[in-house]
């Protein structure tokens, strides 16, 4: 491949494959360049450091989780149904990743943990989506909340067991789906009953 036809997306595609084969510790920019058949200088023209390349890989991985959720957040239907589906979609996306390929999940989780700025932005995006749904619920008369933003942080924290990688060992346990339904039902009741407040959230990927 010529350096002129090299794109950031092609580099990221290749970097993902190299990371999958060799892991984070053993993967270098030179490895990615070799797999592409270009000089490592060509990679640096798109990603000036190894860290920036890793951050971009992590951001793209997290976007694959966030993008389908954004579609739900921007729908016009009943907010309570959208909230339950949003939370279910998030939990199932994380569970599929860890159960289908635990080793690859561990690689990406480690990568994301090293890219804290990327993770923080991901969490902000998710809580913004939750805020939109909860604000819609208030407008529809389904929720009574003093602050949709605070309520969104509270919902995110209350469901952390089902989407934070620190709890991934629990996701294959019998009864986890029933536990999820109980938690979401309690959240829905709390949002409908009174002003829900949220505190500091735990950043998660």
Image (spheres, helix red, strand yellow):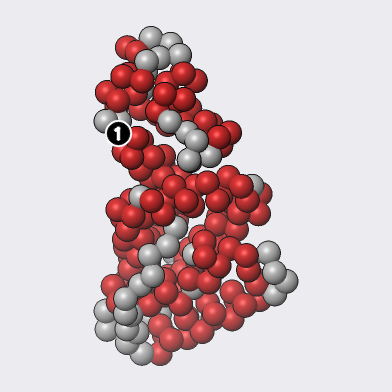
Picture coordinates of residue 118, whole percent (x, y): 33, 51
Q: Is residue 10 visible?
A: no
Q: Is residue 60 above or below residue 90?
A: above
Point 58% across, 63% down: residue: 168
Quadrant position of the N terminus in the picture? top left
| The furthest residue to the front | 26
Secondary structure beneath label 1: loop
| The furthest residue to the right | 174
Q: Is residue 149 visible?
A: yes
| The furthest residue to the top | 2
Q: Is residue 41 left or right of residue 155?
A: left
Picture coordinates of residue 203, whole percent (x, y): 38, 65
Q: Which residue is label 1 attached to?
A: 49
Picture coordinates of residue 85, whole percent (x, y): 52, 64
Q: Quadrant of residue 150?
A: bottom left
Q: Is residue 85 above or below residue 121?
A: below
Depth check: give the residue in front, 73 or 15: 15
Total number of numbered discs in the rendering: 1
Point 37% across, 15% down: residue: 39
Depth check: give the residue in front, 112 or 201: 112
Point 34% across, 23% down: residue: 43
Q: Quadrant of residue 126?
A: bottom left
Quadrant position of the C terminus in the picture? bottom left
Point 43% across, 31% down: residue: 28
Q: Is residue 91 above or below residue 21?
A: below
Q: Is residue 171 left or right of residue 116?
A: right
- Label 1 neighbourhood size at 10 Å, few (<14), some (14-19), many (20+)? few
Picture coordinates of residue 104, whole percent (x, y): 58, 45
Depth check: give the residue in front, 121 or 75: 121
């Amino acid at each position: 491949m010529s350096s002129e036809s090299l794109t950031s997306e092609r580099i990221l595609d290749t970097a993902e494959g190299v990371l999958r084969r060799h892991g984070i510790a053993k993967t270098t920019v030179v490895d990615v360049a070799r797999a592409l058949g270009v000089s490592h200088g060509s990679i640096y023209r798109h990603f000036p450091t190894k860290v920036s390349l890793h951050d971009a890989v992590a951001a793209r991985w997290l976007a694959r989780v966030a993008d389908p959720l954004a579609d739900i957040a921007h729908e016009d239907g009943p907010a309570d149904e959208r909230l339950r589906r949003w939370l279910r979609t998030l939990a199932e996306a994380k569970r599929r990743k860890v159960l289908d390929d635990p080793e690859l999940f561990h690689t990406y989780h480690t990568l994301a943990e090293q890219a804290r700025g990327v993770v923080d932005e991901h969490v902000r995006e998710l809580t913004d989506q939750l805020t939109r749904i909860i604000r819609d619920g208030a407008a529809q008369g389904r929720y009574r909340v003093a602050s949709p933003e605070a309520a969104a942080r509270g919902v995110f924290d209350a469901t952390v067991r089902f989407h934070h990688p620190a709890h991934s060992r629990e996701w294959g346990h019998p009864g986890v789906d029933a536990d999820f339904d109980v938690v979401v039902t309690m959240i829905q009741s709390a949002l409908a009953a009174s002003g829900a407040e949220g505190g500091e959230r735990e950043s998660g990927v």
